[in-house]
Image (cartoon, helix red, strand yellow):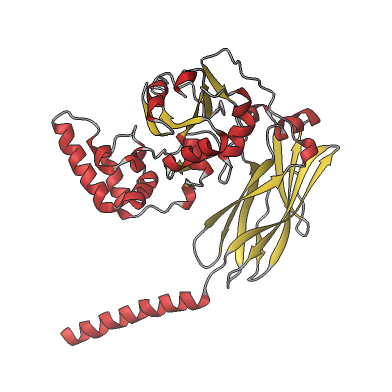
Amino acid sequence: MIYFLFILLSTIALFFVFLEILSKINGDCKIILLKKNFKFISDPPSLNLEITISNQGKQQAIVVDGFARIVPEGDKFKKVKISTLLKSKVLPVREDGYFEAFILKAKEELPLEISISLDSSQELSLLISEASIIEVEIFIKYYGRSLIKNHRQVFSIDIPTNLQKVLPATPNKNKRVIPIKTPLIRPGTNLIDIIRKYAMPFTEPQDIVVIAETAVAISQGRCYYVDEIKPGYWAVKLCHFFSPQSSLSSPYSLHLAIREVGLLRIILAIFIGGCGKIFKRAGDFYRVAGRAVATIDDLTGTLPPYDKYVVLGPYKSKQVVNKIKNTLGVDVAIVDANDIGKVDILATTSPRIKEFVEDLKTNPQGNANEQTPILILKNLIAKEDL
């Protein structure tokens, strides 16, 4: 009997091994998108982006659905009527925007076109003002031998120089705190160029330039689209220890926290934080976990399109502020200010400016829809102290 059970279990195990080997040998489909061409049409105003959908896998893909949208460039997009149409030159065209499913064989490519039409040339001007690029986000849903996959890709469109416009707003120099409106800070944005262009014309030697920590982190590429984060077992289970108001109550942000400082440190911080609550002591978790965890923003924590991203804290903040000061000659601080009167100073170019920056209790900084992630604190340091 035991011998029979051994043979049976061995056969079942070998069968599962065979299935795994077979699936590995056969492979699956793999969809990627390739940008080919971009053109601007003035009448009627539209932006057309030609791309190629490519199946680089070993199996055919069933492309179920697809759509495109503009990645927002601030609050003004709420007033712009944009319609996007994702279509193929070789498939039946439906002007109602419906995306018909189709088969894409292994190693096959198919051209697609994204047409972004606007109601008027005025709206087109609004769309491209303040921006040197426009980003188009494309979603493709497909499956092959495996379950349905959702592929997302973002393409940048360079706007011709003759179509770009300078930001119209002129800050009031008489104010003590001046919010500086900027273009959308994206991964790879050069913050020194942004400060030089938009803040330095209104900055005097005794002023302080304050930058939102989220803007610094995004410029460093420390932001992760939620669909591209794959939380592990511990992130899914440990997130239940945090209140719903905490960013770490999400398995996605907690997964990145574990990746930043390690699982053992997070578990230790949870234990010590729990003990602290027994004695009505707050903040022990973050004292143990560290600033890298405390500065993580979960979804909705910043402006679109990064409201769909988990944003980590900035990397090497002290080096960032020192580089800005050495280049532009102005004192700089990176802060995390919120609407409940808390200001966390991550780095400054000089200890003596901390007391001035800590006065930002009302959070005039707008790294959300206001799109003013930079502040100028006017005349706060006496000239004779410089």
Number of numbered discs on residues: 0
- In this view, the residue farthest toward the bottom is 3
Q: Quadrant of the N terminus?
A: bottom left
Above or below for 94 versus 324: below
Q: Quadrant of residue 358?
A: top left
Tell me which residue sits at (24%, 42%) in the image.
Answer: 288
Compared across the picture, whether 3 is left or right of 147 comes to left
Residue 55, x across and y down, in percent: 63, 66
Above or below for 317 versus 365: below
Viewer-side residue, 79 vs 35: 35
Viewer-side residue, 321 vs 346: 321
Tell me which residue sits at (71%, 32%) in the image.
Answer: 129
Residue 84, x across and y down, in percent: 70, 42
- In this view, the residue farthest toward the left is 279
Residue 14, x across and y down, in percent: 34, 81
Q: Quadrant of residue 198?
A: top right
- In this view, the residue farthest toward the right is 43
Compared across the picture, whether 147 is left or right of 5 comes to right
Tell me which residue sits at (42%, 76%) in the image.
Answer: 19
Residue 46, x across and y down, in percent: 78, 40
Tell me which residue sits at (75%, 58%) in the image.
Answer: 91
Q: Quadrant of residue 180?
A: top right
